[in-house]
Amino acid sequence: MTKASHPRVVSLIASSTEILNALGAGDLQVARSHECDYPPSVLNLPAVTRPKFDVSGSSSEIDQRVRSLVERGLSVYEVDAEALEALKPDVILTQDQCQVCAVSLADVERAVCEFVHSRPRVVSMHPHTMADIFRDIHRVADAIGRPDAGDKLIASMKRRLAAVSALVMGLPRKRLAFIEWVDPPMSGGHWMPELISTAGGISLFGVTGESSPWITWKDVAAADPDVIVVAPCGYDIDVTRREVRPLVHYEVWQNLRAVRDGQVYLADGNAYFNRPGPRLIDSAEILAEIMHPDACNYGLRGKAYVEYEMIPPGVITTKAG
């Protein structure tokens, strides 16, 4: 097989790794980022990036570490340029959307400048809306020489979104607060308002195509949502359970109508919602099942999301839980 028909691909962002595999081209990938974990087979590939901060601890501690690096004009992640060049990639997939989420385009360009023997094609994702994500899928498919696979994947994703929209059409729209980070709280922007609308809801925070906004719990109380979905970026359900436990100490949280009515849900923010790739369609299905369970049953409860169970304050011995 020729190089042109079987290019060596390095994906340095989890969403493009998922796109590559959804295109049926996982066999082309020769390396990944430290965050690429789906499908599980990619864990067998070498990781050529790493964070410059301690990723353990609470969301508040991680936020402080990341802010400290960014405020000093430093990158949050680094690329192993020597390992990357040794792999002789033909295509490198990266992003220039968020310097906090993954290795940036600037990081990759600095690494590639050190290459001696090759000049790979660098394809950078820049997604803010669903239309952007579809364009990025086309760009990845074109870069690996499989444009037809890109067309098929996009058509499939659009069909599934249309099916979700059809199921909730005419139903009362739920006012939803999507929480993308817990401490300090942040809501979902970019594509999230679109997904919430498709799933039969109204996004109370965030504007389609714009960055995710920082909010306060007082803002949430003032908005009085029907439903709250907590899905922190990079956190699975077990970690999210840990992160929300201290909220029981906040009077404003305890008094939220959604909390009192049992309409708070914890979702897997690592697998869904925050990765601009094929599983955003699953994310729309999760939201539809949460907001309109009588009309939508995808079998995702207990797998992709769970109901929040508020622990009485006296059960928790420290604020950290």
Image: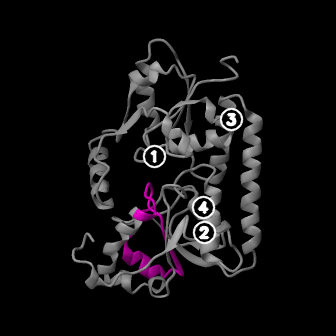
* Crowdedness near tag 2: few (<14), some (14–19) or many (≥20) residues, C-alpha within 10 Å: many
Q: Earlier in the sequence, mark 1 or mark 3?
A: 1
Q: Marks 2 and 4: CB-CB under 8 Å?
A: yes
| Residue range (magenta) | 213-238
Q: Work out whether mark 2 precedes mark 1 in sequence or the reverse, and give the earlier one.
A: 1
Q: Residues within 10 Å of mark 4 (few under 14, many from 20)?
A: many
**Foreground mark, 2 or 1?**
2
In primary-sequence order, the first of circles 4 and 3 is: 3
Query: The N terminus lies in which quarter of the figure?
Result: top right
* Residue 256, above or below 297: below
Label 1 belongs to which residue? Answer: 98
- On the image, which quarter does residue 290 sit in? bottom right
Query: Could you tell me how far apart the alpha carbons at marks 4 and 3 are, in whole angstroms?
Result: 23 Å
Q: Are marks 2 and 1 in contact (CB under 8 Å)?
A: no
Q: Is residue 223 magenta?
A: yes
Q: Does dot 3 land on a helix, a strand or a loop?
A: helix
On residue 283, the disc is: 4
Residue carrying label 3:
141
Identify the mark at residue 287; answer none if there is no mark.
Answer: 2
Residue 55, x across and y down, in percent: 32, 49
Give the alpha-carbon distance from disc 2 to disc 3, as whole Å.
Answer: 28 Å
**Quick check: 288 above or below 181?**
below
Mark 1 neighbour class, 10 Å CA radius: few under 14, some 14 to 19, many 20 or more: few
How many residues crowd mark 3 within 10 Å: few (<14), some (14–19), many (20+)?
many
Q: Amino acid at mark 2?
A: Leu
At label 4, the amino acid type is Ser
Which residue occupies the foreground of this view, 61 or 306? Answer: 306
